[in-house]
């Protein structure tokens, strides 16, 4: 390699290091934002809290995200992305649509339970009537894969005659996520109201069984019940 080639290669390596460092900083700020917004909501979470949680500086948030609103949008996009990645990792046997649908229901309920930040961030955004997420050009991109999983299972069940053809994949998806979401988003007030701790494994398992049964009864042909 000539001396000239060496001098040209060195700056490229330094740029690569800088880019990696920038990506790490941005990711750290985004993870901190998800944590703070999940704990305090959009209104309660501050730029200062987020920068401190990321061991960074306020100016870095403005540099990478522009403002608090854009950072919140990025946080919403990231939690949707994580959900899609986890759902894409599901291994469903579409030759057994009933079992596959049970797997989808279990996945959704357990994901909400194991990722409370997903629920609390969406709660915060709904308090703001969705005014931040509408700024995202990725929102519908994230919804398509999620609904397509349910659609694939539903189509296979309809094709083999075990599922009713009148059920829409959108409605079935909303039923599943609603039953999973409500349990998690209201578990504290419901526990006090019902006099029963909804966070115990036994109660959650009972609810999971109930939801699976409700979903299957919705889609199965009467002859298959």
Image (cartoon, helix red, strand yellow):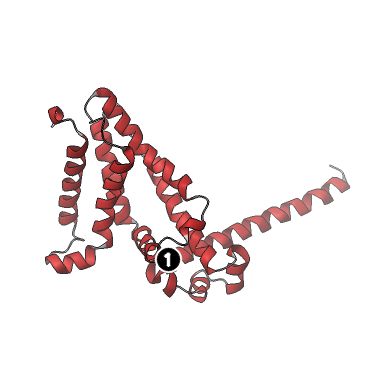
Relative to 99, is 52 above or below?
Answer: below
Query: In the image, what residue occupies the spot 18% across and 64% down?
Result: 190
Tell me residue 115's x, y (percent). Answer: 35, 57
Tell me residue 17's x, y (percent). Answer: 67, 56
| Front-most of residues 206 and 128 | 128
Query: In the image, what residue occupies the spot 23% across and 24% down?
Result: 161
Say whether residue 51 is left or right of residue 92: right
Quadrant housing residue 114: bottom left
In the picture, which quadrant includes the C terminus? top left
Relative to 75, is 173 above or below?
Answer: above
Q: Secondary structure at mark 1?
A: helix
Can residue 102 be seen by looking at this rendering? yes
Say whether residue 33 is left or right of residue 107: right
Query: In the image, what residue occupies the spot 22% across and 36% down?
Result: 219
Can residue 29 be seen by looking at this rendering? no
Quadrant housing residue 59: bottom right
| Front-most of residues 22 and 112 | 112
Query: In the image, what residue occupies the spot 54% across and 63% down?
Result: 70
Total numbered circles: 1
Residue that label 1 marks: 35
Tell me residue 1's x, y (percent). Answer: 84, 42
**Dot 1, how many residues are within 10 Å of its Cα: few (below 14), some (14-19), or many (20+)?**
some
Tell me residue 14's x, y (percent). Answer: 72, 56
Of all residues shown, which one is farthest toward the top? 160
């Amino acid at each position: 390699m000539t001396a000239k080639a060496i001098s040209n290669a060195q700056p490229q390596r330094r740029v690569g290091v800088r880019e990696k460092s920038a990506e790490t900083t941005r990711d750290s700020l985004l993870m901190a934002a998800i944590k703070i917004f999940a704990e305090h909501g959009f209104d309660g979470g501050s730029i200062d809290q987020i920068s401190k949680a990321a061991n960074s500086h306020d100016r870095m948030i403005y540099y990478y995200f522009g403002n608090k609103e854009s950072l919140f949008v990025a946080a919403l996009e990231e939690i949707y992305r994580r959900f899609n990645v986890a759902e894409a990792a599901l291994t469903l046997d579409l030759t057994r649509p009933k079992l596959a649908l049970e797997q989808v229901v279990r996945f959704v309920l357990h994901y909400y339970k194991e990722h409370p930040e997903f629920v609390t961030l969406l709660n915060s955004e709904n308090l703001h009537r969705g005014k931040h997420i509408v700024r995202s050009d990725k929102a519908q991109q994230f919804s398509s894969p999620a609904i397509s999983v349910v659609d694939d299972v539903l189509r296979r069940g309809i094709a083999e005659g075990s599922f009713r053809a009148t059920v829409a994949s959108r409605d079935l998806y909303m039923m599943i996520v609603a039953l999973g979401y409500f349990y998690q988003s209201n578990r504290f007030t419901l526990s006090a109201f019902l006099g029963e701790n909804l966070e115990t494994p036994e109660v959650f398992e009972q609810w999971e069984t109930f939801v699976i049964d409700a979903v299957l009864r919705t889609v199965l042909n009467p002859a298959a019940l």
